[in-house]
Amino acid sequence: MKKDLLTFADWTPEATTRLLALASEIKHSPASYSQVLAGKSVVGLFEKPSLRTRVSFEIGINKLGGHMVYLDSQAGKLVGREDAQDMAANLACWADAIVARVYSHDTLLQFSEAARVPVVNALCDRYHPCQGLADYLTVFEQFGNTTGRTMAYIGDGNNVTHSLLIVGALLGCNQVVVTPPGHEADAGIVAHARTLAAQTGATVTTSNDLSAAEGADVIYTDTWLSMGDDTPLSAIKETFMPYQVNEALMAATGASHVMHCQPAHRDLEITGSLIDSDCSLLMQQAENRMHGQNAILTHLLSS
Ligand code: CP
Ligand code: NVA
């Protein structure tokens, strides 16, 4: 039966740990994996803009011996021209996997149902699992482990927050999520992360108070306005500005490193000087996108 990767929510700690180890192995021994996708074709369907995800998938698939066909729906919605399930069934006639960045998680569920090939979530409104995997590979490389570490996410409770919560809980990393009131992470996903964390001994804390981030090893932030959210910046800037990740916050929490999935908005959710500082892991995260995704594709397509 074909497997998908729409979210890590239904994964076990053991399987997630194995996937992280595979990502690290592919990163360090690329020659051993240069043919795992030989002769295989992947469709990358993007309803929203992308720099990192698109390029890291395309180059990464190439490094595994396969190739990607990029479908750009930014000029006009592809999903809408025909039903999502018809489109996915057609794509599966030619492709060995579908990588999709979509507005709605429901679209991915429709793709998954209709396509007889694996579907990989390249970001939707609820999750960004490929980002989460790359980020914990980065934490693992930086600290030598994920278990017992503490990541504090500060900002808007969004798709990236949700995947960090889930993957972090599976890998034993304590989670602190600090958001302005009214911008919390989804309560159901937080509750699910707690059930996963109970299996690994990790803790999940949510707060509107920045002091909850004290003692974290790493501070993480993301844009205050995700793609598809048309709220003007002026309407939320005052609410979010006290939650800016800056040098003073790093000092107050004692965190040694800062992370951001990018694209970053300098001097809004994070100061430009912090991005450029020695404590920034942003480029390591970006590089690890490719290795994490190659592990996902290897797992889905070669077993
Ligand atoms: N982090 C991330 O997904 O970047 P892109 O939106 O550029 O793909
Ligand atoms: N939360 C952001 C992540 C971008 C990679 C968004 O959905 O736009």
Image (tube, rainbow, N blue to C red):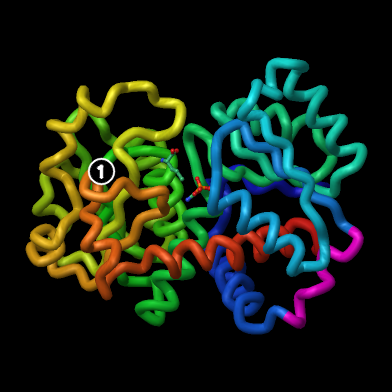
Q: Nearer the viewer, residue 141 or 215?
A: 141
Q: Quadrant of residue 149?
A: bottom left
Q: Amino acid at mark 1?
A: Gly
**Above or below for 250 versus 232:** below
**Above or below for 48 versus 299:** above
**Above or below for 161 versus 34:** above
Q: What residue is rendered at 87% in x and 65% in y?
A: 38
Q: Which residue is mark 1?
A: 155
Q: What residue is rendered at 49% in x and 32% in y?
A: 125
Q: Position of residue 33 (x, y in %)?
A: 76, 75
Instruction: Report whether 144 appears left or right of 245.
Output: right
Q: Nearer the viewer, residue 93 or 49?
A: 49
Q: Quadrant of the C terminus?
A: bottom right
> Does residue 206 show up?
no
Q: Position of residue 156 (x, y in %)?
A: 29, 38
Q: What residue is rendered at 25% in x and 43% in y?
A: 155
Q: Quadrant of residue 224?
A: top left
Q: Which residues are magenta?
A: 31-39
Q: Position of residue 232 (x, y in %)?
A: 29, 23
Q: Position of residue 234 (x, y in %)?
A: 21, 25
Task: Check if residue 33 falls in the magenta segment.
Answer: yes
Q: Nearer the viewer, residue 261 or 71?
A: 71
> Does residue 286 show up?
yes
Task: Check if residue 172 falls in the magenta segment.
Answer: no
